[in-house]
Amino acid sequence: MPEETKAAKASAEVLLERRRRFRRTRVRELKMIAKALASTKHPVLVHIIPMRRCNLDCGYCNEYDNVSKPVPLLEMKKRLDILADIFSSRTRVRRNLRKRGIIAGMITNGFLLSKERIATLNEAGLEHLQISIDNLVPDEVSKKSLKTLDVRLEWLAEYSVFQVNINSVLGSGVKDPEDALKIAHRAVELGFTSTVGIIHDHNGQLKPLGPREQEIFEEIMILGKKSFSRFNNFQHSVARGKEHDWRCRSGARYLYICEDGLVHWCSQQRGYPGIPLAQYTDEMRHREYYTAKHCAPMCTVSCVQQVGIIDNWRGPQTLKPKPMAPPAAQPELVQIGSTRTDS
């Protein structure tokens, strides 16, 4: 952690616009929840990948490569239009979304943030931004450290008008679990929300925490009481290595769209159903809504769990996934090390 840190202060103008955007976003989120409760026929959260390539190579990640090109802008706009047409309420990409009534969020490692880029994100209407920070100082597993990112966090505290969440991680592969707690406290000091992720294996499955890690987890959850994390009771089971009973709505209420434009259950279950977004019909989403997922009891993919909260009380899942044809041989994504984490 940097030896000297400061609680960066935003100007009165930034604070005013930040409050305005927060109020507008909260109203739209409440409308989204009401719409989702009223009807199960449309997605609630879409995680869309504009680019697989990453400027980092974190040892636990199975979601990056260093060769693929970004999705062309015109193609990305086409995909966003398709999503808007099926009444998606929230999509994680930043451009040209609010015109279609979509709440826009972005996940980034933060390394390329600058004051100018923050201003561009403000102007584009971004509403949520999340950065995951793995440790206090870089190591051979991860460069996403507080030491390297703290100045950019200060810029966000001073200039951003969108909501910022800092996600720390716990689990095997993280050398010092105390780092997560220090990162969470720094996030709160800067005025951000704070959440904690639990490292999972390459299938998104549970890796239980140790006793001290569980204590730190609970402390961070308390720090994050002002965020949506206070509803994530499933994570308490995850931290204790217990199965949790819930109904995963991936493929229906939650869509993961890879850089090739294919719909998958989630980032850790890529390959099924593997159907192009333009061909993914209402009937397919309806079927996935009622399809039980074999990986659900030990899942740690929090964004999918959050969406599931809306429908856990209804729609019993009685269907099984359809048989899949053998996939064509393709190069695998780069996978380094034996531990993985949710973005």
Image: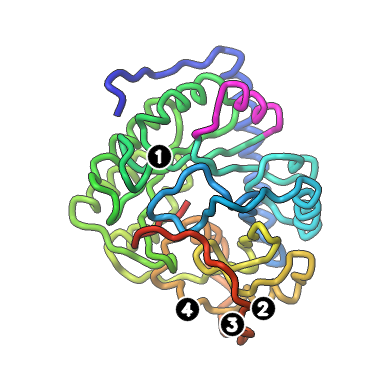
- View extreme (left): residue: 211
Residue 144 numbered tag: 1
Residue 112 on the magenta segment: yes
Mark 1, mark 4: which one is toward the viewer?
1
Q: Residue flagged by tag 2: what amino acid is it? A: Arg
Q: Residue flagged by tag 4: what amino acid is it? A: His
From this view, report whether residue 255 is shown above or below residue 183. below
- Kindly report the distance in space between the C-alpha atoms of the residues bearing marks 3 and 2: 9 Å
Nearest to the observer: residue 161 or residue 24: 161
Q: Secondary structure at mark 1?
A: loop
Location of mark 4 (residue): 294
Q: Quadrant of residue 122?
A: top right
Location of mark 3 (residue): 321
Of the numbered discs 3 and 2, the one sitting upstream in the chain is 2
Q: Mark 3: few, some, or many residues within 10 Å (few <14, many ≥20)?
A: some
Of the numbered discs 1 and 4, the one sitting upstream in the chain is 1
Q: Mark 2: few, some, or many residues within 10 Å (few <14, many ≥20)?
A: some
- Magenta segment boundaries in residue numbering: 111-125
